[in-house]
Image (tube, grey):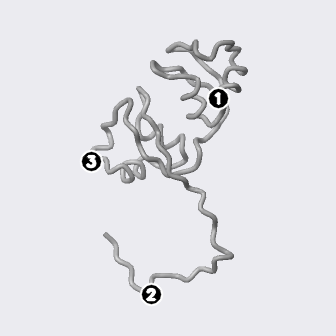
């Protein structure tokens, strides 16, 4: 634990203070994810995720577990992802910061409820 003295505190002018851009949200762990892959999606570090969620062993997380995430919205990059068992277009869209409609359109999917494990999707 680190202690601050009164001499360590700076006074900030409210007009020059940076707006808060980090928001707290919840991420549901998908099969095959680890803290590093989740952190990369939200622009944070695995160490921060472990600390925020009080994980005594950051190597042990499980599918379905809810993790608190403090960071920006999921990082949307163009690329590909492989559908994993239990994924939905909705969960994939949220993971990559896009919409179900965009994913379906980009991948020629007419029924967004019909995707399968191993399917490669571009986003």
Q: Of circles 3 and 1, which is in front? A: 3
Q: Is residue 24 above or below residue 113?
A: below
In front: 115, or 113? 113
Closer to the chain start, of discs 3 and 1, is 3
Q: Secondary structure at mark 3?
A: loop
Q: Which residue is mark 3?
A: 56
Q: Earlier in the sequence, mark 3 or mark 2?
A: 2
Q: Secondary structure at mark 2?
A: helix
Q: Residue 97: image x %, image y %?
A: 62, 37
Residue extending farthest to the left is 56
Q: Is residue 107 above or below residue 90?
A: above
Q: Position of residue 116 (x, y in %)?
A: 53, 13
Q: CA distance from mark 2 to mark 1?
A: 48 Å
Q: Secondary structure at mark 1?
A: loop
How crowded pointer 2 is (Cα within 10 Å; few <14, some 14-19, many 20+) is rated as few
Name the residue rendered at 44%, 35% in the picture: 28
**Cα–Cα gap, marks 3 and 1:** 33 Å
């Amino acid at each position: 634990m680190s202690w601050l003295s009164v001499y360590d505190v700076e006074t900030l002018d409210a007009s020059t203070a940076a707006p808060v851009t980090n928001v707290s949200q919840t991420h549901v762990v998908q099969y095959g994810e680890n803290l590093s892959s989740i952190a990369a999606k939200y622009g944070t570090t695995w160490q921060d995720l472990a600390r925020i969620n009080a994980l005594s062993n950051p190597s042990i997380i499980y599918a379905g577990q809810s993790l608190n995430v403090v960071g920006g919205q999921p990082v949307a990059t163009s690329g590909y992802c492989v559908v994993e068992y239990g994924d939905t277009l909705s969960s994939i869209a949220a993971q990559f910061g896009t919409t179900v409609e965009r994913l379906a359109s980009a991948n020629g999917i007419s029924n967004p409820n019909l995707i399968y494990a191993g399917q490669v999707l571009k986003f």
